[in-house]
Image (cartoon, rainbow, N blue to C red):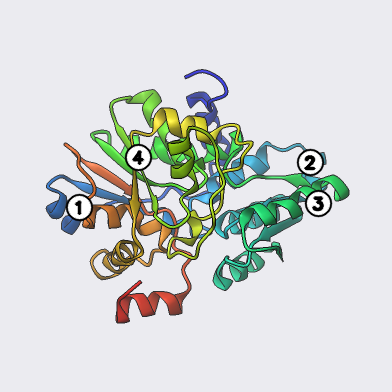
Amino acid sequence: MSAPFVTLAEIEAARDRTAGHVRRSFLDRSPTLSRRLGHPVHLKLEHQQITGSFKLRGATNAVLSLDAEARAAGLVAVSTGNHGRALAHAARAAGCRALICMSALVPQAKIDGIRAAGGETRIVGRSQDEAQTEVDRLIAHDGMTMVPPFDHPAVIAGQGTLGLEILEDAPEVAAVLVPVSGGGLVSGVAAAIKARRPEVRIIGITMERGAAMHASLAAGRPVEVEEQATLADSLGGGIGLDNRLTFAMTRALVDDMILLTEDEIAAGIRHCYREEGQVVEGAGAVGVAAILAGRVRVQGPVVAILSGGNIDRNDHRRLVCEGGP
């Protein structure tokens, strides 16, 4: 891979840097999904990460990569919830301030999670792009340091540590199912895996409602999309018209992209709870949902990343007990 791609060396350095700060998540075989697919299916239980999502990996690597002056200025970010919670946790561990800007579409449970982790919150507008304008203002006027949710080399490298773990725990893997939003996770995982085993298929999965990366790939350039309410709320938001890394990396490294309906995502959440015993949010359930919907065509073992579990418990109970999206 050539610049500006994040490299395997950067991902390996991120693993060393974040050791002791993040949890190595388990890889668990799913008998029910394996029978359905006809090949072994393993679930990467990243929703059991310390802050409830994979985002802690990238946020921690980014914070630990900053110098003392940048940390002292205070950290600011836009988020759909999970990055904000992760950054708040990492900032508190480093002894610095974190302010998270979000749109009104972010669920209250995720806002509460950020505050519980020690972060300050600010709600701005009804899209991630609108919230980003407040981040830009805080950088310009207050001198704060931005830690982006995805389009940042240290963040991508941190997320890529998941790919290293998958190859170590499932060396025979043929395909990896990765939730896609801004592309930080899928870029990092793909960079790690393709560098060592280029034949492994990386399949990105997202929702039909407001899939910014999918729309951008179709257009051949980053584009804006209208954000919409979705069960996979963590996958909402744009990728940035000035995207520097994740668009190019996703275009080059991801083999396929699957879009899911709200009913399919709901079915994934229910399956995770009823059959796997896991409480997973909509974004975290999309890999399972794609298998259940018959969208995954592979020849060999599969790993599906359960990327997050930060779902409102009342919403989860309604989905599991009452059905429907």
Q: Would residue 26 appear left or right of 125 to someone viewing this image?
A: left
Q: Earlier in the sequence, mark 4 or mark 1?
A: 4
Q: Earlier in the sequence, mark 4 or mark 3?
A: 3
Bin the neighbour count of mark 2 within 10 Å (Cα to Cα): few under 14, some 14-19, many 20 and up: some
Q: Earlier in the sequence, mark 3 or mark 1?
A: 3
Q: Position of residue 53 (x, y in %)?
A: 48, 55
Q: Would residue 137 appear left or right of 159 to someone viewing this image?
A: right
Q: Which residue does the numbered mark 3 point to in the structure image?
A: 138
Residues under numbered marks 3 and 1 in contact, where contact means CB atoms less than 8 Å apart: no
Q: Position of residue 16 (x, y in %)?
A: 54, 34
The type of residue carrying mark 1 is Gly
Q: Nearer the viewer, mark 4 or mark 1?
A: 1
Residue in view at x 20 percent, y 52 percent: 294
Bin the neighbour count of mark 1 within 10 Å (Cα to Cα): few under 14, some 14-19, many 20 and up: few
Q: Which residue does the numbered mark 4 point to in the structure image?
A: 166
State how far apart marks 2 and 3 are (Cα).
14 Å
Vertical side of 48 occupied by 108: above or below: below
Q: Which residue does the numbered mark 2 point to in the structure image?
A: 70
The type of residue carrying mark 3 is Leu
Q: Nearer the viewer, mark 3 or mark 1?
A: 1
Q: Earlier in the sequence, mark 2 or mark 4?
A: 2
State how far apart marks 2 and 4 are (Cα).
33 Å
Q: Nearer the viewer, mark 2 or mark 1?
A: 1
Secondary element at tag 3: helix
Residue in view at x 72 percent, y 38 percent: 66
Residues under numbered marks 2 and 1 in contact, where contact means CB atoms less than 8 Å apart: no
Residue in view at x 27 percent, y 33 percent: 171
Q: Which residue does the numbered mark 1 point to in the structure image?
A: 294
Q: Is residue 49 something one can see in this rendering?
A: yes
* Picture quadrant where residue 165 is located: top left
